Amino acid sequence: MAFMKILIAFILLWPFVGFLFNGLGRNYWSKKVIAYKATGYIVASFIASIFAFLHVQAHGAVTVHYFDFMNTATLKIPFDFKVDALSSLFLLVITGVGSLIHLYSTAYMKDEAAPHYARYFAYLNLFIFSMLILVLGDNYVVMFIGWEGVGLCSYLLIGYWFTNGNYNYAAKKAFIMNRIGDLGFLLAIFWLIAKLGTVNYSEVLTYERISNLSSFDITGITLLLFVGAMGKSAQIPLFTWLPDAMAGPTPVSALIHAATMVTAGIYMITRSNILFSHSEITQNVIAIIGISTALLAATIAIKQNDIKKVLAYSTVSQLGYMFLGLGVGAYSGAVFHVITHAFFKALLFLGAGSVIHAMHHEQDIRKMGGLKSKLPITHITFLIGCIAIAGVPPFSGFFSKDEILAAAFAKSPIYWVLGVLGAAMTAFYMFRLYATTFLGKFRGSADQENHLHESPAAMTLPLVLLAIASAIAGAIGIPEMMGGHHWLAHQLIPIVGEPVELGLTHSMEWILMAVSVSIALIALIIAISTYIKKTDEEPSTAIGKFFYNKWHIDELYNEAIVLPLNRFAGFLKNVIEKQVIDGAVNGTGKLVQYSARKVRLIQNGQVGYYILFMVIGIILLFVFWFNDLSILRFFSNLNQH
Amino acid sequence: MILVSLLFIPILAAILVLFIKNNKLANWTAILLSAFTLLLVLQTLAAPIADFDIAWLPNLNSRFVLHADGLAKILLLLTAISFPSILIATAKNEYKQKNVFLSLLLFTQAGLMGVFLAGDALLFYFFWELALIPVYFLCSIWGGEKRIAITFKFFIYTFLGSLFMLAGILFVNAHTVGHSFSIQSFVHANLTNAQQVTAFALFFIAFAIKMPIFPLHTWQPDAYEQSPTAVTMVMSAVMVKMGLYGILRWLMPLFPFAFMAHTHFVVALSVMGVLYASFIAIRQDDIKRLIAYSSIAHIGLMNAALFTHTQVATQGVLIQLFSHGINVLGLWIVADIIEQQTGTRSMQQMGGLAKKQPTLAILLVGFALANIALPLTNSFVGEFLMFNGLFLFNPWMAALAGVSIVLAAIYTLNMVQKVAYGDISEKINTMQGPNKGAQAVLIVLLILVFITGVYAQPLFDLTADTLKQLFVK
Amino acid sequence: MPIQYYIFFCLSLFSIGVVGVLTRRNAIIVFMCIELMLNAVNLLLVAFSKMYYGLAAQNGVANTVGIDAQIFVFFIMVVAAAEVSIGLAIIVMMYRNTHSIDINFLNRLKN
């Protein structure tokens, strides 16, 4: 126990120490010191994570308690952390991929001035810290701390080049959209507290506790949790921030907006799978939103010409697949896809970064082409990434995607058909990207061509390692029908239970697999043969324009939500506040002044008038007196009614 | 005895400073004596303190009772931290007749300490006014160009509220055994339900104006805008807490029936006010007005939480009383530095602070994050508990108020973007950066923000007795 | 003579005084009207005093009844005399300063 307490503190605190070290010392350290320390802390955390992983393998899940975060008479929220099969896997992915991306960044960001270099690594370290809190927390509130923390780091890193107004806008958009999701998450937590009085996983996620909840409660809670996941994992309708988030430095896109943070929603739902399995409605909602997001993003990706935008929409699309998996109950499949996706998407982004680096910050693929010979390592690794994401066996993406598709087929063949359609589009746009970038002739300026160079070792080493991982990571989940053991599914039994029997015969599974793979291969070949020769110009067809302009969703949000709200706020500020409320307040003052001005005229200084009023007053008093209508009686009468 | 000294050291300091003509010396005296008050307050935190009780106005049956429980202590702590911070942060600001300025500020501190300590209704009223009157002079002498009209409005508005409260105090006093003013006899006053509602209304108007809650809030943005920033800090960090304190100390225990009868009305009103103020904050260009509306939104949320009458939310408010004071103080200090050095409050003319003054920009972002209640900042703890209570009270209200979380992110990040990011603007380019004192204060406050955000247990322990009194019969 | 006669007589005297005070602008006439009102009251006091004394004497109760009213009358006369001396002095001073005894000139206190 004590060992684990120290180990977990070790895992968590190293990145935090790195954050403080880089953040506070940004004006003092040289770039070399910053680079070594920042990367070193994450590697240290990674090594500690390996120990934690091995410990869980040997002794099972461990929960450690540090102190109470909130402690009132009716509610207690402890700072508890838990390492179990699920979180130890995420630990490895986060710190592992994180270390590689830190290493990559040391070279990628080398043109930045030292204080900004330090700031960059401080944010990156803080991000790892928040992400670790997110996956290690033993209750929803601790998860929420990490949840908002990663949102903050994402905000800071998207707006890393803060003098650029558009980047700031993108950063703000990301944070606000995430906040909308966070509100859903928060309400779900309150709902849990209201019904169960606790947010600890070990107490909430048990069959006895859940059986106390009505189905309305479960549906409500899970839907709200899913709203949180929508924001963080960029699902319809809260997905538009993720493509804009590409404003940040490319390694950030790789780490945060592809490999780790955006998978937080999948982690959360997998963590609470017992709750979600109890609500048919929520599961259907998740599956439908997942598959729609996958298709929507894929159609947009087909028409984009910015290398990072294509990858960004591809990420949204792949996240949609994961949610489809969650919706049809393939939790281990979704986690499997998270892991393989972390490898190949990080690889693709880093490869894109390498290309952008070589092209001097040119991101338009129409101005690239023929980079195959100039950037050999980048080319090979990028190709491996493309194959992996397209789902070609035996690369990793094939196994994880197939697992989700098989489960989708078991639930409803429609999901499967749509899923395969999406997979075909994925293969198409990835190889369109690959062919336009690496094949054919170079289309950039002569100046750019002269400067083309392969990236330094600090950048290519992570590429190679990630390429190897993308190629072989499928091994952790080879299905039994292929003679494998599906190590991952067995791993996750304590979290998601025994793998659900899909009720499909082996021959049926083989057929499904063959169909999806062959469709993907056809799309792949069409893409290569088309784009080896030409590039996409501005789309001419209506549907092409529609996809190219991202379904006009940004404009729709702007017109339907942002502008009306802004106008409403302006109305409140200028009309209601200034004229109605303050008008009433000032009106009271003005009324007093006005009546005072009028009444003042009586006091005109003429003695005769004063005497006259005196006499009138005396006469009135007498009249009231003798008519038994004394003033006091008058008021006391008023009081009684 | 320590309680009396908490009252009289500021008064003595105020009188002393009044006679020191040398600005620098006056400043140092004020800072040292207010720091000494802080030390004394820290001493009171550890153990329960016996009441201080002597005869005061025997004809009226009013006694000079000072009483410090958790609620009082947490606000005393806030007051005691705020004043030295404000004095240090604004030490370099030029005011004519600075010794008089400082003296009036210290009188305000005495008044505030008295409000939080008073255990007798008449004494409470006395200090309530004592805290208001120096502020009137501070604003009307040292304020901005529209100070006369604005201060007049502010004074009349709040004074009107105070008079309602005085009427309420006399009303309850007439129904106590032996016409006493002590809080115990007020609690046990023989009031019928209808009478409770009358007295409740009289008190509530005073507190609602002071906080302020929608729609009685319009004095506040103007007053914050026109006052010298040191005074704005006092008002915003500490004085608005008087209203919430009043509800916790007087309304809840005194008029339980009337309180429970109005929960729905007040919660709905407050939540509406929260959204209203948040929306207006989105459209503000003046940084001081933005912070003012943000503060109205936060205070409205605290009021809504109090009126849910749940233990969780009340605990949240007790923590948030302190947290909000610290956060808003930090924001004001940053805003003041920017205004003093650029001569503008319009955010349109700012931009590029992060490039020109990175340290100040980091501090601004830190307090901005606390303002939007990011986890691990102090206000997350309070707001989480408050929202939790709201949810228990009525889930729809919690959802509605929750929208303000999103709105808060919008206006706060707008501010950060306009002030800190972008290219260096003309105005920002003239900045020298904060002086050492102000910077040190900001850093200390920011550290406090994160420490109480991670480990709030001391605050929970401090306020446990008040909570017990309010909820365990 | 029935008491009503006195009452109506005094009432009309008093009313003449009031109307005089309200309508006349000459300070001396106003002053005289005030005296008229005072004396109307004096007369009424004496009349009532006589009436109560007479009633008491008829019943053989006491012979001091109504005496206090007559004492009042003396007081009023003394006060009136003092008032006249001061009032006339003011009027004289006023005449010296403004060459007028119109009371509407007395609105100088205004502003």
Image (cartoon, coloured by chain):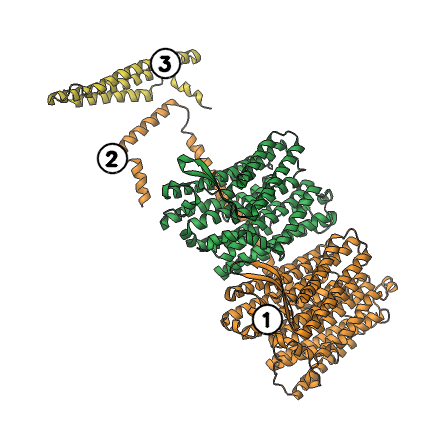
Chain colours: A orange, B green, C yellow
Residue B14 visible: yes
Position of the N terminus of chain A, as image quadrant, is bottom right
Q: Residue at x 59, y 37 (%)?
A: B143
Q: Mark 1 sits on what residue?
A: A272
Mark 2 residue type = Asn
Disc 1 to disc 3, C-alpha distance: 100 Å
Identify the image quadrant of residue A368: bottom right
Residue A317: quadrant of the picture: bottom right
Residue denoted by label 3: C86
Q: Is residue A532 left or right of residue B90?
A: right
- Compared to residue A230, the image places residue A502 above or below, namely below
Tell me the chain of label 3.
C
Element at badge 1?
A: loop
- Choose between A332 and A532: the one closer to the eye: A332
Q: Is residue B181 left or right of residue A131?
A: left
Q: Which residue is nearer to you in this view: A120 or A437?
A: A120
Helix, strand or loop at label 3? It is helix
Callout 3, which amino acid? Ile
Q: How much space separates mark 2 and mark 1, taking CA atoms?
A: 83 Å
Q: Position of residue B277 (x, y in %)?
A: 55, 51
Total number of numbered discs in the rendering: 3
Residue B302 location (% of width, % of height): 53, 52
Which residue has dot 2 on it?
A: A627
* Residue A10, image x, y percentages: 71, 63
> Along the polypeptide, which appears first: circle 2 or circle 1?
1
- Up-down relation of residue A548 to residue B430 (above or below): below
Q: Are marks 2 and 1 on the same chain?
A: yes
Name the side, left or right, on which B365 lies relative to A224: right
